[in-house]
Image (cartoon, rainbow, N blue to C red):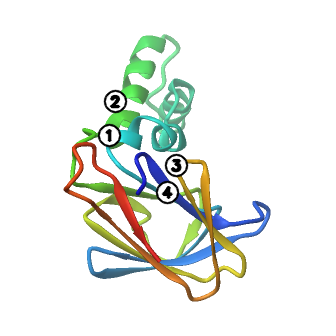
């Protein structure tokens, strides 16, 4: 059981993580990244929020790039825009959804994050690992698969990892 999140990645952080994702029964492709993060509603305000967070400075930079920036930019507006964008993945602790997020990676498909009910991960890493709630580590090898779904028996929704 995971209360907050599960992360799958190569054990050595300098090595590319490679894996396939099947989301709600649909193969969405092969990914290459620094890892993939799966979150419950309880974990959506922690690691997931931090990993996906947009800052006011990034909003300001984007406005400047697309020509919306003027000399009198209001920092409070940039902050509010950044907060609104960043909070799109914050959801209730008792939700029956899982959020998956491919961390800053190159993907062969364009579906690198989103909400779902069931996930199946196929490992293509030589020395992969699954990290549960930041403290429990389970090694996974080439070709190993694991799945996740919300366990509705718990008031706070937990991910159930099946290896």
Sequence-earlier tag: 3 or 4: 4
Q: CA distance from mark 1 to mark 2?
A: 7 Å
Q: CA distance from mark 3 to mark 4?
A: 6 Å
Q: Residue at x 47, y 32 (%)?
A: 63
Q: Which residue is mark 3?
A: 133
Q: Residue at x 71, y 82 (%)?
A: 126
Sequence-earlier tag: 2 or 4: 4
Nearer to us: label 2 or label 4? 4
Residue nearest the observer in this picture, 86 or 2: 2
Q: Which residue is mark 4?
A: 6
Q: CA distance from mark 4 to mark 1?
A: 19 Å
- Please report contact status of discs 4 and 1: CB closer than 8 Å, yes or no: no
Residue 100 located left or right of residue 132:
left
What secondary structure is found at the residue carrying circle 2?
helix
Q: Which residue is mark 1?
A: 88
Q: Which residue is mark 2?
A: 84
Sequence-earlier tag: 2 or 3: 2
Q: CA distance from mark 2 to mark 3?
A: 26 Å
Nearer to us: label 1 or label 3? 3
Find residue 136 and report its horizontal and vertical position in percent: 59, 55
From this view, report whether residue 100 is shown above or below residue 44: below
- Please report contact status of discs 1 and 2: CB closer than 8 Å, yes or no: yes
């Amino acid at each position: 059981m995971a209360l907050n999140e599960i992360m799958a990645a190569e054990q050595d952080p300098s090595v590319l993580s490679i894996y396939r994702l099947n989301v709600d029964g649909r193969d969405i492709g092969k990914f290459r990244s620094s890892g993939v993060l799966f979150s419950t509603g309880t974990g959506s305000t922690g690691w997931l929020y931090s990993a996906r967070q947009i800052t006011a400075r990034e909003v300001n930079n984007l406005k400047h790039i697309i020509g919306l920036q003027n000399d009198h930019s209001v920092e409070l507006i940039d902050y509010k825009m950044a907060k609104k964008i960043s909070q799109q993945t914050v959801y209730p602790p008792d939700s029956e959804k899982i959020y998956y997020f491919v961390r800053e990676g190159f993907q062969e498909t364009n579906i690198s994050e989103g909400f779902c009910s069931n996930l199946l991960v196929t490992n293509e890493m030589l020395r992969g690992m699954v990290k549960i709630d930041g403290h429990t580590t389970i090694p996974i090898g080439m070709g190993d698969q694991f799945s996740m779904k919300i366990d509705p028996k718990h008031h706070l929704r937990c991910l159930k990892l099946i290896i």
